[in-house]
Amino acid sequence: MTEPTSLPDPAVRVADARELARDLVVVPDGGVPLVPNIGVIGGSHSVLVVETGLGVRNAEAVLRFAVERARGRKLYLTTTHFHPEHASGAQVFAGEATFLLNRDQADDLERKGPGYLEVFRGLGESVARRLVGVELVRPDVVYDREHTLDLGGRVVELRATGRAHSRGDQVVRVPDADVLFTGDLVEAGQFAIFPWFPPHDADVSGTRWLAVVERLAAAGARTVVPGHGEIGDARLLTEVRDYLELLRDETWARRDSAMGQEAIVAEVEALMVRRRPEWAGREWIGKGVGCLCAEHRTATATPAG
Ligand SMILES: [Zn+2]
């Protein structure tokens, strides 16, 4: 893993915004760790911002950018999940935008948000600086499973996926442009991020995550905006599905033969790195194995051929 102090400044660069479709832009992460891909989606009377970036100053830049684009249209904000680089700037939007979340994510934010801020402050000076003055705020509107937001001549579908990368993941779909914002359910060019830190955080579920991306892959999308990494097409969905499936099968096959967890991690990590030598985030493979070991049930495990 990168030395904490050497993490680059996780700055959102709104000047790099790219138009994916009419009145639909993404501020790309620029390949910088702890910068998410951020969406600004417009309709005739309203504009939805997806993700705030890490901390107050990033969120201020995103809000300024959104206000300029909105030209008087009403603003909404949502985030794909509560992790700080996606959601920790929401306070900046208070009074400017209606903050809309699925219930499980709102609960995550309240229960686990403060602890995650502390952990992130320990990741290095550049990150801690970004988190100065952050105060977590509650959403204005909370929905349970699905919410359709009418922006005027364009609807956006907000869907709670159920527990996967976190307990309260949400995806955002723009049907007319066939664009899907996945948050960290999908990353491009890196191994799936498993925030598996028992006993502090054991909400991530490899099996449920796989079920979610199976559904997303079956539904497809012309353009997929991952939580981090290059914007792509539906192949991003099948790549993550295939990775999680293989991770589960290889982990469980070894668990069935009563191999110890350390040995499983070593073998599966080596296998996955051989398969995807170009992917970053190798430190998350072992976390994923740990998570799937905890989810292993002999009755449902089938030996991998
Ligand atoms: Zn995340």
Image (spheres, helix red, strand yellow):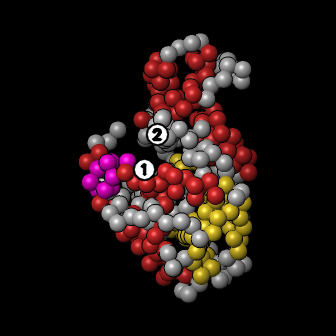
Is residue 63 shown to the viewer in this render? Answer: yes
Q: Residue at image x 54%, y 65%?
A: 138
Q: SS class of the residue under badge 2?
A: loop
Dot 1 corresponds to which residue?
Answer: 115
Count of labels shown? 2
Whether 298 is drawn above or below 294: the answer is above
Left-right relation of 7 to 206: left
**Ligand 1: does it lie within 8 Å of the C-beta at label 1?**
no
Q: Nearer the viewer, residue 293 or 21?
A: 293
Q: Residue at image x 43%, y 50%?
A: 116
Q: Which mark is residue 200?
A: 2
Asked if marks 1 and 2 touch (Cβ < 8 Å), the reply is yes
Q: Is residue 123 magenta?
A: yes
Q: Earlier in the sequence, mark 1 or mark 2?
A: 1
Whether 174 is drawn above or below 123: the answer is below
| Amino acid, disc 1 | Gly
